[in-house]
């Protein structure tokens, strides 16, 4: 792994995603027991575009897509980013290991796909942040 930083990055990201999915599974939206509060909302009393994402993810993990959408209308698309990335880490790592001649193209393809997926899924957040900065 020491000589393969790409695989190390994929492993770290995959472990992060396992914890992310585990967090969403352990803490229920209906029990309202999420230990990480929205500090911005607590300080200002204002809701942000990301308010309700943790509860939304908890409902998505449980298959409650309607209530997940009620917690945050962007929850499903953001969750899909992480869900797809989880499987892409395995797919691209597999190709990286077994198709050594194409490693450069694998990393480039992974980067392009991940950037496009990120921008697609997080676009409302990007727009919101840019508009918040320009105020």
Image: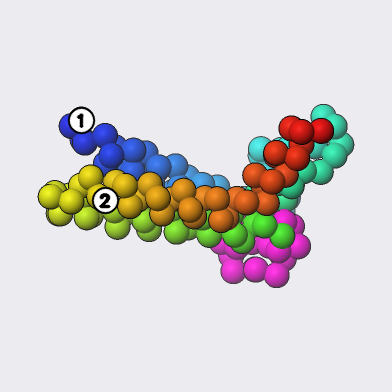
**Which dot marks residue 106?**
2
Mark 1 falls on what kind of element? loop
Q: Quadrant of the N terminus?
A: top left
x then y, percent, for residue 106: 26, 51
x then y, percent, for residue 62: 58, 65
Q: Residue at x 72, y 60 (%)?
A: 73
Tell me the CA gap for discs 1 and 2: 19 Å
Q: Which residue is mark 1?
A: 2
x then y, percent, for residue 96: 21, 49
**Highlighted range, magenta:** 57-72
Q: How is the image coloured?
A: rainbow
Q: Residue at x 65, y 57 (%)?
A: 75
Q: Earlier in the sequence, mark 1 or mark 2?
A: 1
Q: Residue at x 40, y 42 (%)?
A: 13
Q: Is residue 110 left or right of residue 69?
A: left
Mark 1, mark 2: which one is toward the viewer?
A: 2
Alpha-carbon neighbours of circle 1 within 10 Å: few (<14), some, or many (≥20)? Answer: few
């Amino acid at each position: 792994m020491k000589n393969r930083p790409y695989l190390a990055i994929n492993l770290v990201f995959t472990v992060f995603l396992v914890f992310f999915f585990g967090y969403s599974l352990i803490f229920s939206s209906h029990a309202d027991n999420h230990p990480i509060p929205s500090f911005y909302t607590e300080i200002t009393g204002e809701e942000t575009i990301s308010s309700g994402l943790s509860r939304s993810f908890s409902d998505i993990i449980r298959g409650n897509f309607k209530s997940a959408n009620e917690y945050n209308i962007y929850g499903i698309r953001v969750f899909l980013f992480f869900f797809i990335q989880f499987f892409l880490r395995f797919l691209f790592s597999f190709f990286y290991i077994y198709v050594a001649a194409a490693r450069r193209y694998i990393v480039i393809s992974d980067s392009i796909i991940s950037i496009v997926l990120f921008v697609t899924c997080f676009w409302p957040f990007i727009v919101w942040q840019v508009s918040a900065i320009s105020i």
